[in-house]
Image (cartoon, rainbow, N blue to C red):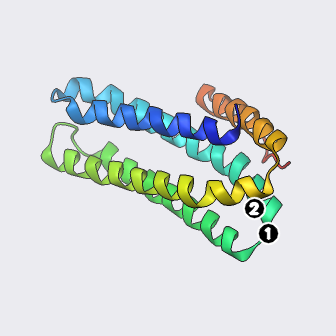
Amino acid sequence: MDIYSYIIRDHRRLAGLMDDLMSIRVPAVRQPLFRQIQTELSAHSDAEERTFYAAVENATQTQVMNDRLELSEHEHHEIKALMHVLSRLSVGSGEWMEKFGELKFAIEHHVAREEGEIFPQAKAVLTPLDAHRLALQMDALKQQILAGHDDTTTIYL
């Protein structure tokens, strides 16, 4: 599996979890699913920035790509901020569902931009072997983050 397939798999999994949450009406059931989404989104974005984004930035060194990566990282921060707001609201409130809708929209927008703009340019500068190695590195780092043992440094190809 290469990095693009790995990231797309994560994106689709998170989209499915968000769709599931939107269909749940019982707050007690919604809460643990939201925690799972929070955990997975955080691990995904952190590992993605430290592996994939870092490798693409290192390989391209163009202002256009650096701007796109910076925007993607900014979107990650906005998504984390929305998750923080959600974690402070009552999961049973209408305001919570409205904010969750905003989060879902922000994630969908980010995914479309990442897959539509960053992936094509990354494919032009990363070899297939690099893309395969990055998938392994991102997965290993993500698993460390999820396990709470995030003691690695940024990985560059």
Q: Which image quadrant is residue 114 in?
A: bottom right
Q: For the residue labelled by badge 2, is the local secondary structure a helix, a strand or a loop? A: helix
Q: CA distance from mark 2 to mark 1?
A: 6 Å
Q: Which image quadrant is residue 47 in?
A: top right
Q: Amino acid at mark 1?
A: Gln
Q: Residues within 10 Å of mark 1 (few under 14, many from 20)?
A: few
Q: Position of residue 91 (x, y in %)?
A: 22, 38
Nearest the camera: 141 or 107?
Answer: 107
Q: Is residue 24 left or right of residue 58?
A: left
Q: Determine which residue is flagged by label 2.
A: 57
Q: Position of residue 29 (x, y in %)?
A: 24, 23
Labels 2 and 1 touching (C-beta < 8 A): yes
Q: Position of residue 141 (x, y in %)?
A: 70, 35
Question: Which residue sits at x=86%, y=48%?
Answer: 157
Residue 92 drawn above or below residue 33? below
Question: Which residue sits at x=58%, y=60%?
Answer: 73
Q: Position of residue 42 (x, y in %)?
A: 52, 42
Q: Determine which residue is flagged by label 1.
A: 61
Q: For the residue labelled by badge 1, is the local secondary structure a helix, a strand or a loop? A: loop
Q: Amino acid at mark 2?
A: Glu
Q: Is residue 74 left or right of residue 94?
A: right
Residue 37 drawn above or below residue 86? above
Residue 120 visible: yes
Could you say which disc has been placed on residue 37 in the image?
none
Nearest the camera: 96 or 70?
Answer: 70
